[in-house]
Image: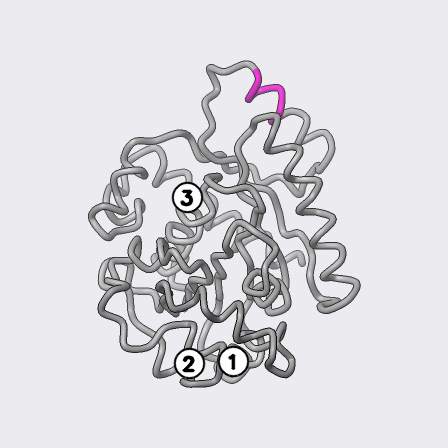
């Protein structure tokens, strides 16, 4: 049975896609069968995995509206070697079309359930809003991984996200829980970031992952080469942090 995790945060620019892509690659390198689902119409996780979103014949849009099966949509990342359900601008239209479909919030869940035995991990990269696409991701998942920067506005957004997760848990998916918070783009030289990090640890306790991803230029450069950072420069500080995070996640799921 696959462990299905959403990588979500309602605030944009907090490293959701970077986390999704690098975690998928790191899990694959750890010997885990991994599927990455790109639920963002921008298709950044698709491009960051080395797949040209402009050349797709099928995308996750076709899966959600019932025009294709998972096997027809799935593409292997040429750089990370994990499987991807890719996205492009077509996915923006799914928001409108899903409104009129039956079980609209569970379309992705039902599609993934058909191939559940094929993977150890399924990671869902969600868009930065609580839309029908994000709702599909949350209804499919066993848990949520929340990447966040240690800044004041990030704390404000976190409370909104936690409330949204509680509502989905109560109304749609009783299995949904917060797996943990991952501190990203961290700069220990900034006092405010140290203070916010300490507040997170105080309030959320062991829900905060020990791994901390630093602000790192090699991680930022990797998408332009169509590679996850852990493949582009495995020895970089950012890549090493994501490899440590993957190992910590594998260890943590044993206690869930």
Q: Main secondary structure of the magenta part?
A: helix
Q: Nearer the viewer, mark 2 or mark 3?
A: 2
Q: Nearer the viewer, residue 67 or 172?
A: 67
Give the number of callouts. 3
For label 2, the residue is 70
Horizontal and vertical percent position of residue 240:
36, 39
Quadrant assignment for the C terminus: bottom right
Q: Quadrant of the N terminus?
A: bottom right
Q: Is residue 194 magenta?
A: yes
Mark 2 lies on a secondary structure that is helix
Nearest to viewer (mark 1 / mark 3): 1
Residue at 45%, 69% in the rendered image: 93
Secondary structure beneath disc 1?
helix
> Residue tagged by mark 1?
111
N-term mark: 1 or 3: 1
Stretch in magenta: 192-197
The residue that disc 3 covers is 242
- Residue 182 falls left or right of residue 207: left
- Front-most of residues 250 and 116: 116
Q: Is residue 239 magenta?
A: no
In-image side of 83 versus 148 (left or right): left
Residue 171, percent across and down?
77, 66
Label 2 close to label 1 by CB (< 8 Å): yes
Distance between the alpha carbons at the discs numbered 2 and 3 = 28 Å
- Residue at 39% x, 29% y is 215
Residue 44 location (% of width, % of height): 35, 53
Relative to the observer, which residue lies in front, 9 or 182?
Answer: 9
Choose top left, top right, bottom left or bottom right for residue 150: top right
């Amino acid at each position: 049975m696959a462990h299905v995790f959403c990588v979500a945060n309602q605030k944009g620019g907090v490293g959701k896609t970077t986390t999704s892509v690098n975690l998928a690659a790191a899990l694959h390198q750890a010997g885990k069968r991994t599927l990455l689902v790109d639920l963002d119409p921008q298709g950044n996780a698709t491009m960051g995995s080395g797949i040209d979103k402009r050349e797709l014949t099928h995308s996750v849009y076709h899966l959600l509206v019932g025009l294709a099966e998972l096997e027809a949509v799935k593409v292997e990342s040429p750089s990370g070697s994990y499987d991807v359900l890719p996205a492009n601008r077509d996915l923006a239209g799914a928001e409108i079309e899903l409104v009129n479909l039956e079980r609209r919030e569970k379309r992705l869940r039902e599609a993934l359930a058909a191939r559940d035995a094929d993977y150890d991990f399924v990671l869902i990269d969600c868009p930065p809003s609580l839309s029908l696409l994000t709702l599909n991701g949350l209804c499919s998942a066993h848990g949520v991984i929340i990447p966040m920067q240690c800044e004041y506005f990030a704390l404000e957004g976190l409370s909104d996200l936690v409330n949204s997760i509680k509502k989905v848990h109560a109304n749609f998916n009783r299995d949904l829980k917060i797996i943990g918070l991952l501190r990203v783009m961290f700069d220990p030289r900034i006092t405010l970031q140290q203070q916010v990090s300490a507040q997170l640890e105080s309030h959320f306790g062991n829900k905060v992952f020990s791994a901390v991803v630093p602000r790192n230029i090699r991680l930022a450069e990797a998408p332009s080469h169509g590679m996850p950072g852990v493949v582009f420069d495995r020895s970089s500080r950012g890549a090493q942090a994501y490899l440590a995070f993957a190992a910590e996640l594998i260890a943590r799921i044993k206690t869930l």
